[in-house]
Image: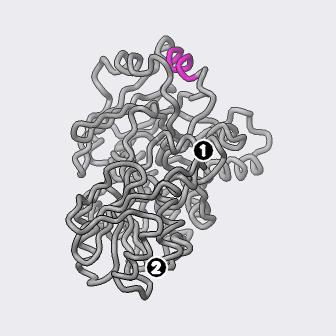
Amino acid sequence: MRLHSFRALRPATGKAADVVSPPYDVINTEEARELAAGRPWSFLHVVRPEIDLEPGASLYTDEVYETGAANLRRMEESGVLVREEEPAIWLYRLDMGERTQVGFVGCAEVEDYAQGRIKKHEFTRPEKEDDRTRHVDTLSAHTGPVFLTCRAPEGVAELQERLMEGEPVHDVTAHDGVRHRVWRITDGAGLEAISALFAPVDAFYIADGHHRAASAWRTRDLRRARSPEAPADASFERFLTVVFPDEQLHILPYNRVVSDLNGLSSEAFLEQLDAHFVVSEPGASAEPPARNGFGLYLDGGWRRMIARTEIAEVKDPVEGLDVALLQTHVLGPLLGIDDPRTSNRIAFVGGIRGTEELSKRVDQAGEGCAFSLYPTSITELLDVSDADRVMPPKSTWFEPKLASGLLINLID
């Protein structure tokens, strides 16, 4: 696989703390407005530009995208963001508590995505593709990287350590306590070592950012139609990515809260669960012990659900996922949630919030139940992608989240 160097737009020295923000898709408009208050250089003014418009306005008007573009220009013209003179690949290290992951930031080829060499595991939604495509096309920039992974190449950790020996260009701790550092690699030997590292890798996998990847493809097609004479390596033929070795990634569970029992009493619900699960008495741990195990919060207490052998031994890479077992045998047939993408009776809670958030929501509602899940493994994600299949909605929650505004890729 190929990862290209690029001339990054980045915060000027000493400005990273003023600029970096959470990704656009992990906070809503009001949270963005609050985080950006009193911070004129926050990158939220670029990726969540509706915060600079009247509250309640549509998120998808031309004015929103044009405001984002104007804010990006303002930050560059003011010297808060500066353009690198030389193309580089960057090492990006994130530290969250005891966990560390290091990725390579560069530009992947849109054609690798189009031809399936950058593999997917999720469906995309047209309206979200439209939004990201308009954002990229209006700003002429990839403002956030697509989060990729690959099976760890031999020697990756040693190369990363060697390339991070000097002082980072930026070292900033975000509002959530995650430390973000980036190192610039411009020397020929370093770039050649990175190229050699990825040469035997036969595929990259999207961990997070399916809509950003799809929008890069659509933007490429738009730009190519406008400029058919552009060279084969035109900047719009590539998109911003960060590639992490699979062995360094940390996936948290994506838990479920259901607003009601679909007309069943608690006793009837538990009785029907018994067909496919061994369910304990209340008082169990809220955390599932292993795959095929679930926590069930019901009537003020946690129970343990263990899938019976006949459903636990499914070999299909999708149907054997814990999220699929729960959907196929509980959420759909018992609780009437046939399409979790559209049902307003189910909420998805990222594992970063802990199981206390699940019990709190059920207790506040006074009805319903919650399910804690064992995290999907990175191996399961790769297996689904290799089979050209898709995971059920909300199967993975990655932590730590990437920062927005550290590195931006401008396109022609």
Mark 2: few/some/many CA within 10 Å (<14, 14-19, 20+)? few
Q: Is residue 184 left or right of residue 192?
A: left
- Which quadrant of the view contains residue 258? bottom left
Q: Residues within 10 Å of mark 1 (few under 14, many from 20)?
A: many
Q: Is residue 334 magenta?
A: no
Look at the numbered disc 1 and give the secondary structure of its residue.
helix
Residue at x 24%, y 80% (from the top left corner): 364
Q: Extreme top residue here?
A: 189
Query: From the viewer's perspective, is residue 30 above or below residue 26?
Result: below
Quadrant of image for the N terminus? top right
Question: Which kind of residue does numbered mark 2 sit on?
Answer: Asn
Magenta stretch bounds: 191-198
Compared with 5, 256 (above or below) is below
Q: CA distance from mark 1 to mark 2?
A: 28 Å
- The quadrant holding residue 247 is top left
Query: What residue would you read off at disc 2?
Result: 344
